[in-house]
Amino acid sequence: MNYKYIYENPSENRQLYMYSDYNGKEFIEAYKKSRNDVLIKCLKKINRTEEELETTNKLLKLSNYSHIKKDEIMSIFCNIIYDRFIIFDKEITNSDLTEAINDLSSLYIKAKNNQSLNKLKLDNLVKIFETKKNFSTEIQNSFDASFISNEIDEIFHFLFSFIIIKYFISFKSLKYFNTLLKLNDLLIYRFYNMNFINVELLLCAISIELKIYSSVEEDILGV
Amino acid sequence: MKFSLILANTARSQAYIQTLISQDIMPKEVFILNDKNKKKLGKIKKKYINSNKNNNIYSFQLATLNINEDLVRSLSKLDIPYTIINSPDINSEELYEVLLKSDTKLCIVSVYAGQILKSKILGLKKSFMHVHSGKLPEYRGSTTLYYSLLEENKVAASAIMINEGIDTGDIVYFKEFDFNFDPELIDLIFDPLLRAVVLIDAIKLLSSKNKKPIVQEGIDGEDYYIIHPLLKHLAILKEKNKCM
């Protein structure tokens, strides 16, 4: 069976997750295979790039990702996002940001510095993502049209990914893992269907999700 | 006590009307939100329907659901007056006009997934009661049965008076249960039955006038969003493992 949730754009099919069918353990295997396929495709794509970024090289060296510790991937994830994020820093400080984009930026900095995160702000971001299915409208309302690109859209979604992973690791509330799964479904959909730029970030995000999933599965099913 | 029912054409509405009738609690009138394109969710799927008719009746506590019996058939059997509203939308002008003329003060609603009552309909001089399948204020929002099974091994339902927030209205009645049902039937069988059980108790409580609704503290609790299929599978597998 196919893991179908990466083949449809949740912004266009708003009933995507409603009344989902139960398909037993086969579904869980399909999910794992689908995520592992994405990791392999990411690695192949990174391999083809000629960039000599330190972080990219580090990822390539760690191609046997199943043995990498979660903290190590989080550290790489954080560093790559920060490298990309600071490119927008000037624009961010000059822009008339919506509250959501402002919160994404400030919560990311706090998460990066291992500071406590404001739950009300985070919950508001979760609400926006869950109801609108992405932050694209917020991004469009925050930045000059000439500045908006796939890259900035991706980066802000990865900031959100980093924030909810950090919060989930601290508090273990399944509500946030639930949102992370949907966010990654969306990013994979974009990876397969659009011009996707930040492949290294997707590799990190999916690797961490799989590691979190393993521990959640063990907690719930005891396997 | 006089009350109206506003029912989407769903399994939950079937459980409500069938359970009310079985308890001899009759609505004064029923408004059925017609889903002409049949695309709305929450209906019994064909795979649930067993060729043996006796296997199509489910129960939980005092609630009952015969999945072969549609809303009109249940109502017609006892000549309960009903009106078909030619829109699935709870906020339609047609329903608003009909409610404006109705003299019942309490409306019990069972709407299609994702719908919320807007300020215009809430502005009518009526109370709208909804049964949420979760403990409030702890579990607000969508598919909270699965979250509470994963986090607390319990299920609950809460009857609330609807306000403009999501599951933030005053609580009329709440009850928690141990889960002991086929977990594959949660969405379209158990959830409707659970809500129907609490609906009956809530109506009895409102009739007795002994208890006033409890105001929810705004900052307490958590908002949940529709459960991802992966977590839903874990919740179902967890319950199945318990039975083995």
Image (cartoon, coloured by chain):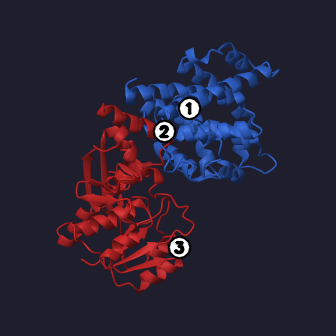
Chain colours: A blue, B red
Identify the image quadrant of the C terminus of chain A.
Answer: top left
Q: Quadrant of residue B38?
A: bottom right
Q: Chain of mark 3?
A: B
Q: Residue at x 32, y 78 (%)?
A: B80
| Quadrant of the frame with the N terminus of chain A | top right
Residue A184 in percent (x, y) is at 60, 37
Task: Give the answer, above or below, for where B70 lies relative to A178.
Answer: below
User: Which residue is at a point 79% across and 18% down the rendered structure image?
Assistant: A52
The residue to which callout 3 is attached is B87
Per the image, the residue denoted by label 1 is A30
The residue that disc 2 covers is A23
- Kindly identify which chain the residue marked by label 1 belongs to: A
Q: What percent of the width, then of the height, locates residue B104?
A: 33, 81
Residue farthest to the bottom, as pictured = B101
Chain to which the residue tagged by mark 2 belongs = A
Is residue A62 at all visible to an observer of this figure? Answer: yes
Label 1: element kind: helix
Where is residue B171? Give x, y as percent: 30, 61
Are labels 2 and 3 on one chain? Answer: no
Give the amino acid at mark 2. Answer: Asn
B142 vs A74, nearest the viewer = B142
For residue A66, above or below residue B105: above
Of residues A181 and A90, which is closer to you in this image? Answer: A181
Label 3, secondary structure: give it.
Answer: loop
Find numbered disc 2 in the image and state the secondary structure of the residue it sits on: loop
Circles 1 and 2 in contact, beta carbons < 8 Å: yes
Q: What amino acid is at disc 1?
A: Ala
Distance from disc 1 to disc 2, alpha carbons, whole Å, reads 10 Å
Residue that extends furthest to the top in the rendered view of this protein: A61
